[in-house]
Amino acid sequence: MTQALWALGRGSGIAALVVLTVAVVVGIAARSGRAITLPRSAIAELHRGASLIACALVGIHVLSLLADPDAQLRLIDIVLPFVADYRPVWLGLGTVAVDLLLAVVVSALLRHRLGPRTFRLIHWAAYGLWPVALIHSLGTGTDAARPWLLTVAGVCILAVAGAVTWRVGANFTEFGRIQRRSAS
């Protein structure tokens, strides 16, 4: 049973990183200002769906490792970063990622009560959440240095970097249009 919990914990953590990457990439694309072939509502649903799946996978990741006696994860380790007995820095980064994820989820649930500016400020925590989760996945666990995990992490990095580059390119394109209009 312990091996099954460990495998579930590892697998759900890696799957959470991949799905979280999809949510971040779609979120960046949705806010780029560029035309996308999918309707805006479909992009929003894809972002929301990927985010919810990532949350569920993170929940499975944490609960399965909490239930696994070999993982030696304590309840306090889930709430307070950097207090774990096992790899406190790396596990602490996972705790920070979970805390940021909770802030983003709560802000999304309370979006209409917070107002757009407050929601956006809190939601920007996702830009910190993703790299912290990535670093956590590369620094902890038994697969941290395995080529297949490094490949998955590399693909995730390339996807987010590509989305950021695409979005920044859209901003420069818009800036150029504004400059040309004001010069005329």
Image (cartoon, rainbow, N blue to C red):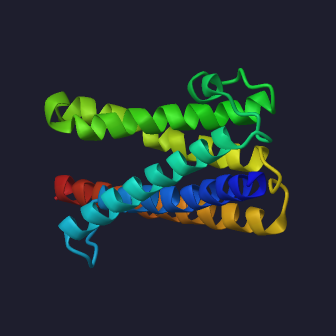
x, y percent for residue 28: 39, 56
Q: Nearer the viewer, residue 146 or 181?
A: 146
Which quadrant is home to the N terminus?
bottom right
Residue occupying the far bottom of the picture: 37
Q: Is residue 11 visible?
A: yes
**Residue that protrudes farthest toward the front in the picture:** 1
Say which quarter of the image contains residue 146: bottom right
Viewer-nearest residue: 12 or 1:
1
**Residue drawn at the location 58% of the way across and 56% of the way down:** 17
Q: Residue at x 32, y 34 (%)?
A: 106
Using the image as rendered, state which of residue 42 and residue 76 is in the foreground.
Answer: 76
The residue at the point 65 percent across, 41 percent down is 67
Q: Residue at x 25, y 76 (%)?
A: 38
Quadrant of residue 65 within the rendered picture: top right
Instruction: Residue 26: name its quadrant.
Output: bottom left
The x, y position of residue 8, in whole percent, is 65, 57
